Amino acid sequence: MKITDLKCAVIGDNPVVRITTDEGIDGIGAAEASKPYLKPMVMFYRDAILGKDPTDVERVMLGIRRMGAFKPWGAAVSAIEMALWDIAGKSAGVPVYKLLGGKVRDKVRVYNGNIRFKMKLNTPEDYAKNMQKMKDLPQKFSIIKQGIAFHGNMAAETPGYYYDDIGDTNEVTDPRSRKKFQGRDQIYRGLMTEKGLNHTIECIEAMKDVLGDEVGLALDVGPGVSVPDALRLAKAVEKFNVMWLEDMITGDYTPYVLSDLYSQVTPYTTTPIHTGEQIYLRQNFKDLIENNAVNIIGPDPADVGGIAEMKWIAEYADIHGILMAPHGTLDGLIGLAAHVQLAAALPHNYIAFEYPNGDPEWWYDIIEGLPETIVKDSFIEVWDTPGLGVNFNIGKAEKYLKEEDKGFFD
């Protein structure tokens, strides 16, 4: 079998990859909806994979992996890797998890960090009401993640929250999607005031009052938190038994790790510390894992270099006593399928992955293969369809293609 073409179309806002072969088997992969600008980077790799056997996934990846980088640029490599595994599974007539060593679990736990409701203000009462809405979702998520401090609007909209408020939003507009993006880590960053720290703790307590011990509370905190504040916050919330504090110092779109800074926090608190969504490749997790700089890592298969890359990282983390709670928001329904196949085969350090949904809603009309009710009581039953297990309904999907992508399904 040989690869005959690599195509990329931005459907909705998700860059979608399609790899075709001389045997008529194709494979699909996708990147986050926050990266509609990624198509040229995907197509950069086209000539490097044409003519190769897509079922030799690692051999193909060796030719392109070195050209990726931290989020967002590792996403192109990752989406291609997903599509290769989709072909490999379809060719063998088995679901991808079978090619990863087989199932460890028949159903996989997911957490909610993606289905959210807008808040008018950033008061403890607003956080409590918002958390109640998420707790009442029909999926009955057993873990819910909320953005606080420098992740979201709290730091920006709470007067006197921190000392280095430069007041510059540095907002830019992507010319393709007209969406606005902010360089958050370079804007909301600095030492919290006592008022800011106390406000954060009050909001966390309000959310815990809603969830009690029935639902775990995870918190997306940064990046942008200073080391002293990270430790102060972690110790202050120990009594609440939160699931984790995520990306406090680095994370999201920061193109570096700084594991030595996390090592100044993690050993001195019982609150679990989490990071890793922006990191590309196993080599860049090495220091975090070997130094036990965090308790939990959260790579995203759509950013880290793909499905197999993430399984290797999970196994290496496991032998160092580090847990896995993969990032997944905005990965879309194709990304969801990749998450399910991967999570089925991960070791026992797996907690849950962040559930990505279809947005806009018409994604559920154009993707086939998903169960009618995807999440039941915070779990997804692992399906046994070959490959990733999902495919496009081409007749329905074609109407959502942009003019420049009309030949995507040819």
Image (cartoon, rainbow, N blue to C red):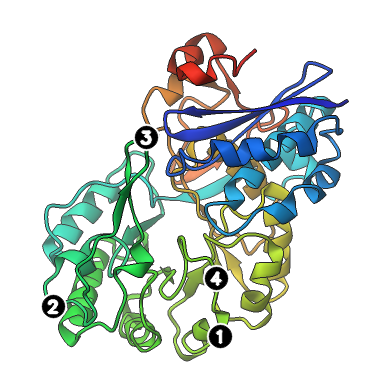
- Secondary element type, mark 4: loop
Per the model, the C-alpha gap separating discs 3 and 4 is 27 Å
Per the model, the C-alpha gap separating discs 3 and 2 is 34 Å
**2 or 4: tag closer to the N-terminus:** 2
Q: Quadrant of residue 145?
A: bottom left
- Secondary element type, mark 1: helix
Disc nearest the viewer among 3 and 1: 3
Residue at (38, 71) in percent of width and height: 242
The amino acid type, in three-letter code, at marker 4 is: Tyr
The amino acid type, in three-letter code, at marker 3 is: Ser
Near mark 2 (Cα within 10 A), the count class, few <14, some 14-19 or many ≥20, is some
Q: Name the residue that disc number 2 marks.
A: 160
Residue at (64, 32) in percent of width and height: 383
The amino acid type, in three-letter code, at marker 1 is: Asp
Q: Name the residue that disc number 1 marks.
A: 260
307 in relation to 160, above or below: above
Q: Name the residue that disc number 4 marks.
A: 256
Residue 281 is labelled as: none
User: Is disc 2 in contact with disc 4, using a CB cutoff of under 8 Å?
Assistant: no
Whether residue 160 sits left or right of residue 37 in the image: it is left
